[in-house]
Amino acid sequence: MIIRNVRILGGEPVDVRLADGMIAEIRQGLDGPESVDGAGAIALPGLVDLHTHLREPGREDAETVQTGTQSAARGGYTAVHAMANTSPVADTAGVVEQVWRLGREFGHCDVHPVGAVTVGLEGRQLAELGAMADSAARVRVFSDDGKCVDDAVLMRRALEYVKAFDGVVAQHAQEPRLTSGAQMNEGVVSGRLGLTGWPAVAEEAVIARDCLLAAHVGSRLHVCHVSTAGSVEILRWAKSKGWNVTAEVTPHHLLLTDDLVEESPVGAYNPIYKVNPPLRTRADVEALRAALADGTIDVVATDHAPHPVEDKETEWSAAAMGMVGLETALSVVQEAMVETGLLDWAGVAERMSVVPARIGRLAGHGQPLQAGSPANITLYDPSVRTKVDPSAFASKSRNTPYEGMTLPGRVVATFLRGRPTVLEGKLV
Ligand SMILES: [Zn+2]
């Protein structure tokens, strides 16, 4: 197959020939019987998400491996890491292999299960990290995401343990006592609305501690969904020491602020904006954008968190936390980072494909678009602007904060090892 007229990382138009799941040749003037017109779209290495909730097993009413990976493919992703907070929890070789097999059978992209750090995400006893690493799923990323590994001794042991197989502990940094009953960012808006505040220090204190622990034992730490300016300062300090610490930011924390809880197009107290960690202030958003641009924050990860209508369309305090994100991630990053001049397309590729693949130790993803690389390719048209319509999502859930917003760009096609999973914006 030949993809004609695409601009690799936004460069000059070229044609790309795919053969046997690989990129065989790139130059101008290629033609053949089986060809797709790229129409000048930007070609990026297939996107890789370090933080996806696929909800299967256990909450198939919210998402399944099939619908979640369809959503991923529509968003330009060729690989996702499936978080462990399923039911049962992915804390044994058996469960991670089950998710891995579901991915092989029903996946529209590669599915790499994340293993839980502690048994049942309960924070009391380490899970079978080695058995999960040795399983068919070959787990390298471990996380109790949704919950924080708040016990310092357990966190230290987990960091020590994963060194044996070059794993990484991905921490959901949230000091539980400081966030008991917390409903939104602690600040001016929470004060006015009378909602229990979620202080920045609850995130920052855990990040500081974990950076010190990772340095102490010489292991790899990854920080999930960084949301405050103070967290950025701590990460900048840890990186200046040469410690092996990486971090992610979500698209929504790059664009939205806590003001939306008070005043938004969908009214006040709308739980569509309820998310963990919470939306923060404009100053935090600016700090996160600058940190992603200068590399203090390494990657964008979606934290795609599907919930059925009944769990979101209820009163604020009862509503579930989380937003879907796979199908809007690239558009939001274009809006927040590219249109603002903070990143070019090579920078986007680095932060949404190359580096996440490296952190997850995925050899087949995040490779440069050149002859000899696996043909994992996303074609993206940044020139259009469209109104977000959740009813058109491939995800089983609709809990997007962008409904009705006009966002730039559109994923035109996604190729997984040379096979299209999306063409002309539609699932294949
Ligand atoms: Zn989390």
Image (spheres, grey):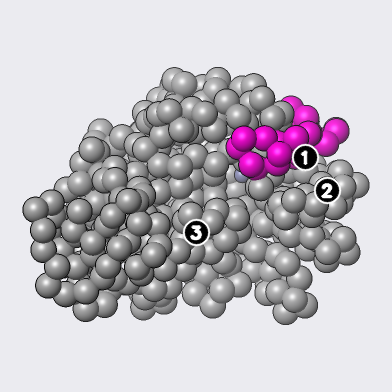
What secondary structure predominates along the stretch shown in magenta? loop
In the picture, residue 379 is in which quadrant? bottom left
Give the answer, above or below, for where 12 lies relative to 144: below
Q: Secondary structure at mark 3?
A: strand
Residue drawn at (60%, 37%) of the image? 137
> Is 365 included in the stretch rendered in magenta?
no
Real-space CA distance between mark 2 and mark 1, rounded to the nearest whole angstrom: 8 Å
Dot 3 amino acid type: Val
Give the answer, above or below, for where 361 lies relative to 144: below
> Is 129 included in the stretch rendered in magenta?
yes
- Between label 2 and label 1, give the one nearer the viewer: 1
Residue drawn at (43%, 73%) of the image? 347
- Horizontal and vertical percent for residue 115? 67, 38
Q: Earlier in the sequence, mark 2 or mark 1?
A: 1
- Where is mark 1, residue-wise? 130
- Where is mark 3, residue-wise? 300
Dot 2 amino acid type: Tyr
Ligand 1 occupies quarter: top right
Residue drawn at (67%, 35%) of the image? 135
In-image side of 63 versus 248 (left or right): left
In the picture, residue 112 is in which quadrant? top right
Q: Secondary structure at mark 1?
A: helix
Question: Which region of the structure is painted magenta?
Answer: 116-139
Real-space CA distance between mark 3 and mark 1, rounded to the nearest whole angstrom: 28 Å
